[in-house]
């Protein structure tokens, strides 16, 4: 099969992914083989490829927003019939036995594996997954449209939950890429007012199209104090500005897996019971809950489509904020973009 392979971490400007033939994987016990139709590109992929996340596997096929159909199953895998359309997300498996898994916090598992990081992912024509960690894709979403829901959507949804935003509340979104352009649709569905802080004029325009009541620069002061805020950009220097924009008792959620250094904070920015909290991975329940709500709304993703062999070009565009919404790699998918 064809796949994009990373032999060792390197700056994306050097185009480190090799488009090449690799053996087609075979499902083991409890696994399904998915013929990949589309795979979303995520900023986490950049962190993996450039080594900002400690390398865990080499060589590696990145990608963790996979949409495809089940083509084969290993021993004991019988939950889904052949041909079922499913999604594969970041959380590939957990140990199921640690204190966090037993407490319903599998996103904090002591011994997890991650798609496209510790195991091969979806920048390929086929990918493996544990059948208990795949998600049926709701009808109404094409493969290309569904791909960004598998990480940008799920992590954005968990970030919204942890931000504590309530109906009628004011929510700030810092950075307006793939996750934010999905999260705003959920927030509006919940009746929140959304204030988007992003430097790129194209992203500001998209935020307004999706219902933001105000847009401004990344560290501009919103015209009203916020009840909650989420930082999706991997930039720690935004934290003071976002805290400054919060009301007393407000919560700031950090939605990325990697962030540059947070500068020293004046205690007055935290005083009055303001809270900073990180968002770590997701639970399977987050994924199932989000996909149900996504179908109810329904979510509409703004995508730019690239061929599988164009993964380096797509990632370079993402790094330079040149993607409006989300980038998606087309593999076996035949549907129009």
Image (spheres, rainbow, N blue to C red):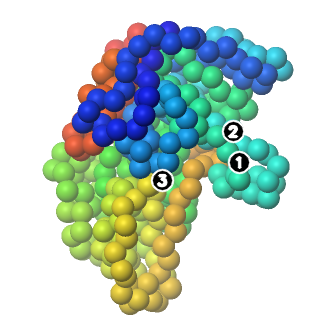
Relative to 246, does residue 165 appear above or below in the rendering?
A: above
Residue 214 percent location from the top left of the image? 24, 62
- Front of the two marks 1 and 2: 1
Relative to 286, does residue 191 appear above or below in the rendering?
A: below
| Residue 62 relative to residue 321: left or right | right
Q: Residue at x 43, y 84 (%)?
A: 270
| Residue 253 relative to residue 306: left or right | right
Query: Residue at label 2?
Result: 93
Identify the mark nearer the N-term, 3 or 2.
2
Q: Depth check: 198 or 168 in front?
A: 198
Q: Residue at x 37, y 21 (%)?
A: 18
Provide the secondary structure element on which disc 2 rests: strand
Residue 148 percent location from the top left of the image? 44, 35
Provide the secondary structure element on which disc 1 rests: loop
Q: Is residue 293 visible?
A: no
Residue 306 placement: quadrant: top left
Query: Residue at label 1?
Result: 111
Q: Is residue 12 visible?
A: yes
Query: Residue at label 3?
Result: 257
Within 10 Å of the Cα at label 2, are there few (<14), some (14-19), or many (20+) other Cα atoms?
many
Within 10 Å of the Cα at label 3, are there few (<14), some (14-19), or many (20+) other Cα atoms?
some
| Residue 317 relative to residue 271: left or right | left
Query: Residue placed farthest to the left in the image?
Result: 201
Residue 194 percent location from the top left of the image? 35, 60
Q: Are marks 1 and 2 in contact (CB under 8 Å)?
A: no
- CA–CA distance between discs 3 and 2? 17 Å
Relative to 79, does residue 252 appear above or below in the rendering?
A: below
Q: Depth check: 177 or 90 in front?
A: 90
Q: Residue at x 37, y 67 (%)?
A: 261
Q: Are marks 3 and 1 in contact (CB under 8 Å)?
A: no
Identify the mark nearer the N-term, 1 or 2.
2
- Front of the two marks 3 and 1: 1
């Amino acid at each position: 099969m064809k796949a994009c392979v990373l032999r060792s971490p390197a700056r994306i400007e050097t185009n480190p992914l090799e488009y090449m033939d690799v053996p087609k994987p075979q499902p083991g016990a409890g696994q399904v083989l998915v013929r990949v139709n589309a795979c979303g590109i995520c900023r986490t992929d950049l962190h993996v490829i450039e080594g900002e996340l400690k390398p865990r596997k080499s060589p590696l096929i990145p990608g963790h927003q996979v949409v495809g159909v089940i083509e084969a199953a290993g021993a004991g895998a019988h939950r889904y019939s052949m041909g079922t359309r499913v999604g594969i997300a970041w959380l590939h498996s957990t140990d199921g036995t640690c204190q966090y898994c037993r407490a319903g916090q599998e996103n904090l598992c002591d011994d997890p594996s991650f798609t496209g990081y510790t195991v091969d992912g979806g920048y390929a024509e086929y990918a493996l997954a544990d059948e208990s960690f795949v998600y049926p894709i709701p009808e109404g979403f094409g493969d290309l449209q569904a791909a960004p829901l598998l990480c940008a959507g799920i992590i954005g949804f968990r970030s919204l939950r942890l931000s504590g935003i309530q109906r009628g509340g004011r929510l700030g979104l810092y950075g307006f890429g793939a996750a934010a352009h999905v999260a705003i649709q959920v927030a509006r569905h919940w009746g929140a007012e959304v204030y988007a802080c992003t430097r790129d004029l194209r992203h500001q325009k998209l935020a307004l199209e999706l219902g933001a009541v105000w847009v401004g620069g990344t560290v501009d002061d919103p015209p009203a104090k916020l009840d909650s805020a989420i930082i999706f950009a991997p930039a720690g220097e935004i934290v003071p500005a976002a805290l400054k924009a919060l009301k007393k008792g407000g919560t700031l959620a950090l939605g990325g897996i990697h962030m540059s250094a947070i500068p020293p904070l004046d205690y007055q920015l935290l005083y009055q019971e303001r809270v900073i909290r990180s968002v770590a991975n997701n639970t399977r329940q987050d994924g199932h809950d989000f996909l149900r709500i996504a179908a109810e709304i329904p979510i509409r993703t703004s995508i730019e489509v690239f061929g599988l062999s164009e993964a380096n070009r797509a990632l370079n565009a993402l790094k330079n904020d040149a993607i409006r919404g989300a980038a998606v790699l087309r593999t076996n998918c035949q549907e129009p973009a």
